[in-house]
């Protein structure tokens, strides 16, 4: 498997976009794999702190591909979140 390198420009654009996260006021759901080794839980916590109206829902028994590992749990989590944030 060959991974494409986006170089410094990718990181510059990504970090620039991250500066706007505190200004995003809409609800944000971070449905995160609690056992992920690639996108470690600490990253979810950092994103949660960056967005003012966000929350983390930990998806157990899943790794980097939550939608493949736990599709039913992910769907339940998303539907619950959508119902709770419908009026926001």
Image: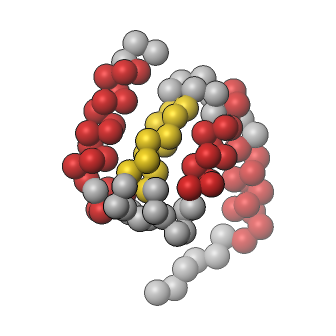
Residue at image coords 54%, 68%: 38
* Vertical relation: 51 (above or below) 36: above
Q: Residue furthest left?
A: 72
- Front one among 68 and 2: 68
* Vertical relation: 81 (above or below) 47: above
Place of residue 59 in the rendered image (x, y in percent of width and height, measured from the top left): 38, 51
Place of residue 18 in the rendered image (x, y in percent of width and height, measured from the top left): 71, 44
Q: Residue 78: name its quadrant.
A: top left
Left or right of 20, for residue 75 = left
Residue at image coords 55%, 32%: 54
Place of residue 88 in the rendered image (x, y in percent of width and height, measured from the top left): 46, 15
Left or right of 37, for residue 63 = left
- Front one among 15 and 68: 68
- Front one among 21 and 72: 72
Place of residue 29 in the rendered image (x, y in percent of width and height, measured from the top left): 47, 37
Q: Residue furthest top?
A: 87
- Image coloring type: secondary structure
Residue at image coords 37%, 21%: 84
Q: Residue furthest bottom?
A: 1
Q: How many marks?
A: 0
* Vertical relation: 80 (above or below) 67: above
Left or right of 57, for residue 7 = right
Residue at image coords 37%, 55%: 60
* Vertical relation: 12 (above or below) 54: below
Q: Residue 85: name its quadrant.
A: top left
- Front one among 63 and 9: 63
């Amino acid at each position: 498997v060959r991974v494409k390198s986006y170089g410094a420009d990718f990181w510059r654009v990504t970090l620039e976009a991250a500066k706007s996260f505190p200004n995003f006021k809409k609800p944000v759901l971070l449905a995160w794999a609690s056992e992920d080794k690639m996108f470690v839980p600490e990253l979810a916590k950092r994103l949660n702190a960056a967005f003012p109206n966000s929350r983390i829902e930990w998806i157990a028994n899943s790794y980097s591909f939550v939608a493949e590992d736990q599709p039913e749990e992910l769907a339940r989590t998303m539907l619950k979140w959508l119902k709770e944030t419908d009026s926001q």
